[in-house]
Image: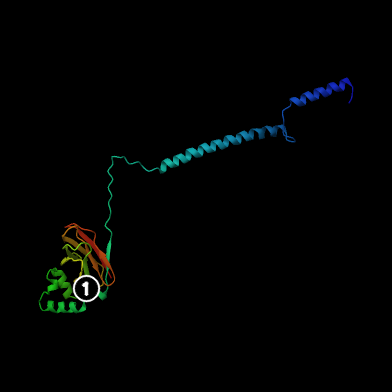
Amino acid sequence: MSNDPQRQKQNAELSSKSSGRSHSMIGVPKSQQKEEKGGSSGFLKTGLALALAGTFLFGGLQLMKAPERIPASTPITSVVAQKERVLTISNVDINEKLTTEIRQKLNQGIIPEELKESSPEVIEKIKNKEMSMYTLRVIDTMVNDGDVVGVSVNNLAIGQIALTNEGAEIQVPLVNNQEQVLKINALRDGGGGVTFGAQSSTGKAMTRVMNVGDIDTWRIVF
């Protein structure tokens, strides 16, 4: 170590300046150091701003999607559409023998027992071979209490049917190979509602529980 007083003084000054100097990035110019120091803070500020913007935007979208609140005092009614009932039939269900016999009687001016309650339009259509007699099995699908229904096809009256749990075969005049509408009108309730079921060779259907005066509408398809 040198004992030169002048050199010792210079070393002491250098040491003092070095201890008071702030730490800097080695090998990076001071102008760039200032930018990088400020960049970290700027990045945090930018990220915070984006986060806040996203929060407001998301909140706005949520508000736009929110359903309108229904006041508690608003009455809410539930309308349940009647389930469509379809009865499928085929030419197998035609009672060929009975149809021929009925046509023969009609040509002689005789109204057969099977058509006593049928409308004049139905009788004319059977005579002209537009309709035939189809065999269906009908039944009271609930309590055997004496329910009675009226049946019509395409708004043409066919007649009344008394229902039982045992069921019975009936002869119904239907339009050949054509979709049509069958309506069942509840005429008499033995108790607990009128319930009618019908079955063909290819399908079956049943009404809902009906009150007297109710009408159940079916589609008949081939």
Residue 30, position in %: x, y?
71, 32
Circle count: 1
Q: Secondary structure at mark 1?
A: strand
Residue 99, position in %: x, y?
18, 77
- Amino acid residing under circle 1: Tyr
Q: Residue lying furthest top in this view?
A: 5
Q: Is residue 168 left or right of residue 29?
A: left
Q: Nearer the viewer, residue 65 or 84?
A: 84
Residue 62, position in %: x, y?
43, 42
Q: Residue lying furthest right in this view?
A: 3
Tell me the colour scheme of the image.
Answer: rainbow
The residue shown at (79%, 25%) is 15
Picture quadrant where residue 198 is located: bottom left
Q: Nearer the viewer, residue 55 or 36?
A: 55
Q: Which residue is mark 1?
A: 134
Mark 1 crowdedness (10 Å alpha carbons): few <14, some 14-19, many ≥20: many
Q: From what the image shows, is residue 39 above or below residue 10? A: below
Residue 88, position in %: x, y?
28, 69
Picture quadrant where residue 25 is located: top right
The residue shown at (63%, 35%) is 40
Q: Residue lying furthest left in this view?
A: 109
- Identify the image quadrant of the N terminus: top right
Q: From what the image shows, is residue 171 above or below residue 23? A: below
Q: Nearer the viewer, residue 32 or 212?
A: 212
Q: Nearer the viewer, residue 109 or 31?
A: 109
